[in-house]
């Protein structure tokens, strides 16, 4: 945080000094199109790195008002009335789709789900918490040329990794959980290649999903809570997700 603040002060201070010394640059910096373009580039980069949706920069370009350089009374809205009306319809439909997909009976709204998937803004409670009925983990096993297997500490199914430190549940555990789910099938080979690079001497990598059903609230009440290790030993199952040969 301190490093980010220092970078912000350095870059912002330098830009302020430069623009104050050059009035023409100051006017260009205040041109709304500069900020809209910068925001669009930022959203595009975020779309490439995270699943937040390409729809966001499109809506940004539709919503924000482009103004001409000059006095405020010359400001005009961007696009024609017909295009702005179309943008309003898209915004309204996008809000309806979001509301429909978080509804308890979201399965009935197939069109909204298709729209959310197409715009890469699919939303669900699984984003915020562990699935309520099943715990899923990613198990990675490295094999050398003689087929000797070594399990890599990739997820919290290993008792020695539980519980993580107070600030230890970082994105790697979330990524491991997502990779074990069907929707992330296309990313598993890249993860396996990364494991090959970071573990020299590995001939192949196996990725497996380890999962167990969480006891229901009624079972928890009758047992007074449950022992994670005991339930894991009794109920855990494994299935092969990927067998990747290292180059």
Image: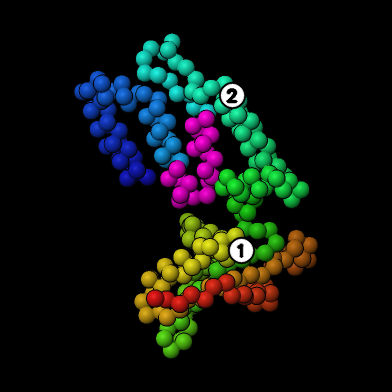
Nearest to N terminus: mark 2 or mark 1: 2
Residue 229 seen from this side: no
Q: Please give left or right for residue 246 compared with residue 79 in the image.
A: left
Q: Say if residue 94 shows up in the picture.
A: yes
For the C terminus, give its image quadrant.
bottom left
Q: What residue is shown with label 2?
A: 82
Count neighbours of disc 2 (C-alpha within 10 A) and say few if under 14, some if 14 to 19, many if 20 or more.
few
**Which SS does the magenta portion mostly show?**
helix
Residue depicted at 59% across the width and 24% down the height? 82
Residue 74 percent location from the top left of the image:
42, 12
Residue beneath the point at 72% across and 48% down: 110
The quadrant in which residue 217 appears is bottom right
- Asked where in the image residue 181 lies, by quadrant, the reply is bottom right
- The vertical placement of 79 against 161, above or below, is above
Q: Nearer the viewer, residue 99 or 221?
A: 99
**Bounds of the magenta segment:** 44-62
Crowd rating for badge 1 (residues with CA inside 10 Å; few <14, some 14–19, many 20+): few
- In percent of width and height, residue 50 lies at 49, 50
Q: Look at mark 1 in the image and give the residue it sits on.
A: 182
**Residue 114's spot in the image, x, y percent?**
66, 48
Relative to 179, is 202 above or below? Answer: below
- Towards the viewer: 106 or 236: 106
- The secondary structure type at the circle numbered 2 is helix
Q: CA distance from mark 2 to mark 1?
A: 41 Å
Lateral position of residue 221 relative to residue 246, left or right? right
**Residue 59 among those drawn in magenta:** yes
- The quarter of the picture where residue 31 lies is top left
Q: Residue shown at 68%/58% (left/top)?
A: 132
Q: Residue lying farthest left?
A: 21
């Amino acid at each position: 945080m301190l490093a980010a603040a220092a970078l912000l002060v350095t870059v912002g201070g330098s830009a302020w000094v430069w623009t104050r010394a050059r009035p023409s640059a100051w006017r260009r910096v205040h041109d709304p199109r500069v900020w809209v373009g910068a925001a669009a580039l930022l959203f595009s980069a975020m779309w490439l790195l995270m699943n937040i949706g390409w729809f966001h920069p499109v809506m940004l370009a539709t919503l924000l008002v482009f103004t001409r350089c000059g006095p405020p009374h010359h400001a005009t809205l961007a696009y024609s009335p017909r295009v702005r009306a179309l943008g309003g319809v898209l915004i309204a439909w996008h809000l309806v789709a979001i509301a429909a997909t978080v509804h308890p009976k979201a399965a009935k709204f197939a069109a909204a789900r298709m729209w959310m998937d197409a715009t890469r803004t699919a939303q669900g409670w699984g984003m915020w918490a562990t699935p309520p009925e099943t715990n899923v983990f990613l198990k990675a096993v490295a094999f050398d040329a003689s087929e000797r297997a070594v399990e890599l500490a990739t997820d919290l199914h290993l008792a020695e990794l539980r519980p993580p430190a107070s600030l230890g549940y970082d994105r790697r555990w979330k990524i491991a959980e997502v990779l074990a789910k069907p929707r992330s099938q296309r990313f598993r080979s890249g993860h396996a290649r990364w494991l090959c690079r970071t573990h020299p001497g590995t001939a192949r990598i196996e990725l497996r999903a380890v999962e167990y059903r969480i006891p229901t609230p009624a079972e928890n009440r009758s047992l007074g809570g449950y022992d994670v290790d005991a339930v894991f030993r009794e109920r855990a199952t494994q299935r092969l997700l990927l067998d990747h040969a290292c180059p």
